[in-house]
Image (cartoon, rainbow, N blue to C red):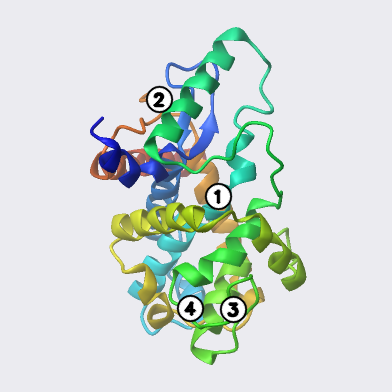
Amino acid sequence: MGDSEDLNSIAYQWCWGSIAPSGPQVWNPLVAEMVTAGSVMLELWEQVLRPRQRADLTDGFAAEAEQSARLAAAFLAGVSRIGHASPARMVSFGARQEPSPAFEQAHTAWREQALRAGLPLPPIGARVRHADPEHITAAVLPRLTGCDCAGYVDGERCRDQDHQGLYVAAYALNRHGADVLHADTVAKAYRATGDPAWDAVRAALVNAVAHHVGIDARSLPHLIRPADPLRLTAFGRLVAQSCRLARGNTLRGFASPHDTLQMMSDRARVHAREAVSRLRVAG
């Protein structure tokens, strides 16, 4: 690793996504799983979805072209877990794992290195606001993808018609079956998003996914304009499937926070091809 300035520039890579205490690399960087989810969505779009399904998704997004819908779908699948980059989620590292000296050592090492890298973790024992990651995603994503309207910084939906599609898409990403996330709950979740340092971490994660997919994150309002979250029900299922496949272990094991984004992108594409290929064979 380089000096402190270099470390701070990659703080987002120290957000954890999945944990496997028995593996050589105990935790997988969240950004690696996010870019992999984007790649899985691209593979599903090309290799699994029928032309009619792609057309329905394009219509649901109100996109002018299927290519716009395809890129937007991949980007949104990748950023659907942006709500995991929050103080409460990060301090819960290994909370569901069986305690052991080896795991405690891994946890301590992660925390120390994450802090050195600039990840704004709260002090041990500090009170931290909690909210479900899906509600945090819905609260913060529109502000990271083109809605810069003043006065709407607490999770409240802005009233600019050009930005309504951002909120529809953000609310549709992590739905519970047919239930759309409730606006009041999303607004309350904003209190658990952390200070501006966490905004910077999430912005870096979103930009990493956008770079991987090949779009400008803030161009999303020009790519899609969904108006009805119910038209995105099938898309929500694809997002869940993409994230599930992205978290699956491969023979290559987890990525490293020391990997470059290009290394993670290359790895993500290989993982996605393998995962979707296995899915097609099993299906």
| Residue drawn at (47%, 21%) of the image | 109
Q: Considering depth in this image, is 1 or 45 the residue closer to the camera?
A: 1
Compute the Cα span from label 3 to label 4: 9 Å
What is the crowding at mark 1: few (fewer than 14 residues within 10 Å), some, or many (at least 20)? some
> Horizontal and vertical percent for residue 52?
48, 72
For disc 2, the marked residue is 253
- Label 3, secondary structure: give it: loop
Q: In this view, does 196 lie to the left or right of 177?
A: left
Compute the Cα span from label 3 to label 1: 32 Å
> Horizontal and vertical percent for residue 128?
69, 45
For residue 118, above or below residue 157: above
What is the crowding at mark 3: few (fewer than 14 residues within 10 Å), some, or many (at least 20)? few
For disc 3, the marked residue is 152
Q: Kindly report which numbered mark, 3 or 4, lies closer to the viewer in this rendering.
A: 3
- N-terminal of the pair, mark 1 or mark 4, is 4
For disc 1, the marked residue is 241
Compute the Cα span from label 2 to label 4: 37 Å
**Snapshot quadrant of residue 7:** top left
- Label 2, secondary structure: give it: loop
For disc 4, the marked residue is 147
